[in-house]
Image (cartoon, rainbow, N blue to C red):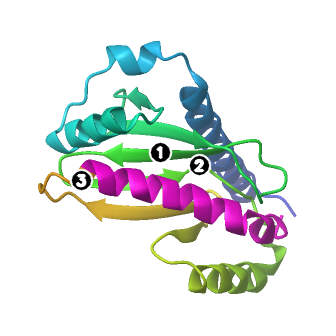
Amino acid sequence: MYTEGNKSRKGCIALKRAMGWIFSLALLLLCLAPAALAETAEPRYDASREVAAYLTEAGRNYRLDISTDDDAFLMTYSPSEAEGLETIAVGAFVNEEQATVMTGALVTPDASDMLKVYQTLEAVNESTSFVRFVYSASDGDITARVELPYVNDGNFGKVVERYVYITALTVDQNYNELAALA
């Protein structure tokens, strides 16, 4: 039976789910946007400048978005194992304290059996190092995520690039198991 409270709650859940998909789409579009975005944006933080310098020196293709509080370095990879994914978009959201490496929504699991969702996530996370797949109850989606504290040692850019790559590789290797939850 629907009441005003249930309608409002269902609307809120639908809005959060839509926002997750919008974030994923925005992340993908920014990764595919023209190179002009990277050419006109300048990193705002020391940590971001280290990341930009390393990515440029290493010849990595990326897009930089400075429209949020963090400087977002967006990269895409082509999957080799993940069925149903054309690209894997990973962002490194860098500020003066840390870099949060993450994907947008990868999977929206069937929430009717949450025990199965959590058991699957536990098993997948047990078999991975560093990167964690996380279920957000508020969004209803699974993302991949890792946080790296900023250490001013001249290697931060390389560390961030490696974790972006490791995140994409981990998604590629585990996506099929996660997609089975949908």
In percent of width and height, residue 57 lies at 31, 35
23 in relation to 98, above or below: above
- Which mark, residue 156? 3
- Please report the bounds of the magenta region as a residue range: 157-182
Q: Earlier in the sequence, mark 1 or mark 2?
A: 1
Q: Is residue 68 left or right of residue 132?
A: left
Q: Residue at coordinates 47% horizontally, 45% vertically from top-left?
A: 91
Residue type at mark 2 is Gly
Residue type at mark 3 is Phe
Q: Are marks 3 and 2 in contact (CB under 8 Å)?
A: no
Q: Nearer the viewer, mark 3 or mark 2?
A: 3
Q: CA distance from mark 1 to mark 2?
A: 8 Å
Q: Residue at coordinates 59% horizontally, 49% vertically from top-left?
A: 104
Q: Earlier in the sequence, mark 3 or mark 2?
A: 2
Quarter of the image with the N terminus is: bottom right
Quarter of the image with the C terminus is: bottom right
In percent of width and height, residue 174 lies at 70, 69
Name the residue carrying label 1. Answer: 91
Q: Earlier in the sequence, mark 3 or mark 1?
A: 1
Task: Please say whether residue 168 is one of the residues in the magenta stretch.
Answer: yes
Q: Are marks 1 and 2 in contact (CB under 8 Å)?
A: yes
Residue type at mark 1 is Gly
Name the residue carrying label 2. Answer: 104
